[in-house]
């Protein structure tokens, strides 16, 4: 449920330009977060999607600055030490972080800003920004999640096993989030995210 906050003249955000807000979208690897995000951004270009920074190598078709900012481990560690990330976390042997300044600027200018991040980072955001709306995407079943991860054909058997172990832990954390959405039927899942953001 979106919060309607009072502003100085006694009006509400329904009558004035909306206040910015941070939206956190998370869920286990392979659940379809990225695909859902792309559909959401196509429908709502007014949303600001925060591009994360990562130390992992680009996957086929990924573009630097659009999918991620791809940087070296040493560069990432330097930025983390300087406090340049809103949150950052290690996942599957790589580091991922959300650049601080761009996100805060967009929120303060009235934008809805969406972060598609891992569980550890989502917990950091909830601690720092308790008013952020947090959404957890669930698979229809664990077997289906495994099928999707294997279907990517991008990881070794060892990496798949690591992702699946991590996914089991992450799914147990779903209740920590404001909203849980099962990505079984894609259109239904996108509509549920829209309802959370705009109703």
Image (spheres, rainbow, N blue to C red):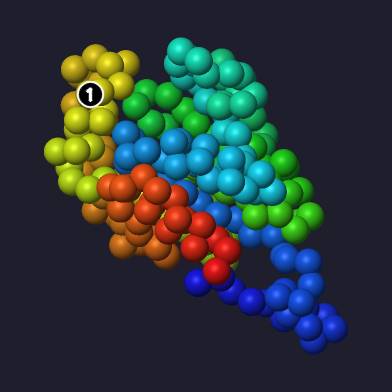
Residue at the bottom extreme, as displayed: 10
Q: Is residue 126 left or right of residue 51?
A: left
Assign a secondary structure to mark 1. Answer: helix
Residue 48, given in percent of the width and then of the height, sits at: 66, 45
Q: Is residue 189 left or right of residue 162?
A: right
Residue depicted at 17% across the width and 42% down the height: 142
* Res. 10 visible in picture: yes
Q: Residues within 10 Å of mark 1 (few under 14, many from 20)?
A: some
Residue at the left extreme, as displayed: 143
The foreground one among 141 and 45 is 45
Residue 63, given in percent of the width and then of the height, sits at: 58, 18
Question: Residue 147's image quarter?
Answer: top left
Q: Quadrant of the C terminus?
A: bottom right
Location of mark 1 (residue): 150
Question: Residue 18's image quarter?
Answer: bottom right
Q: Is residue 151 left or right of residue 69?
A: left
Residue depicted at 19% across the width and 38% down the height: 144
Q: Is residue 179 above or below residue 40?
A: below
């Amino acid at each position: 449920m979106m919060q309607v906050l009072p502003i100085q003249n006694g009006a509400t955000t329904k009558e004035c330009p909306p206040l910015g807000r941070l939206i956190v979208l998370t869920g286990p690897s392979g659940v379809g977060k990225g695909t859902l995000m792309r559909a959401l951004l196509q429908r709502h270009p007014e949303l600001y999607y925060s591009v994360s920074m990562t130390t992992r190598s680009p996957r086929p078709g990924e573009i630097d600055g659009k999918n991620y900012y791809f940087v070296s481990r040493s560069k990432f560690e330097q930025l983390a030490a300087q406090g340049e990330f809103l949150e950052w976390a290690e996942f599957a042997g790589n580091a991922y972080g959300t650049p601080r300044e761009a996100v805060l600027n967009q929120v303060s200018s009235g934008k809805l800003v969406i972060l598609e991040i891992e569980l550890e980072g989502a917990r950091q955001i909830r601690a720092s920004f308790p008013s952020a709306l947090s959404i957890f995407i669930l698979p229809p079943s664990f077997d289906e999640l495994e099928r999707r991860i294997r279907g990517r054909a991008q990881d070794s058997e060892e990496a798949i096993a690591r992702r699946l172990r991590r996914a089991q832990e992450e799914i147990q954390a779903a209740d920590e989030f404001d909203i849980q959405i099962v990505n079984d039927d894609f259109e239904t899942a996108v509509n549920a995210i829209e309802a959370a953001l705009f109703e």
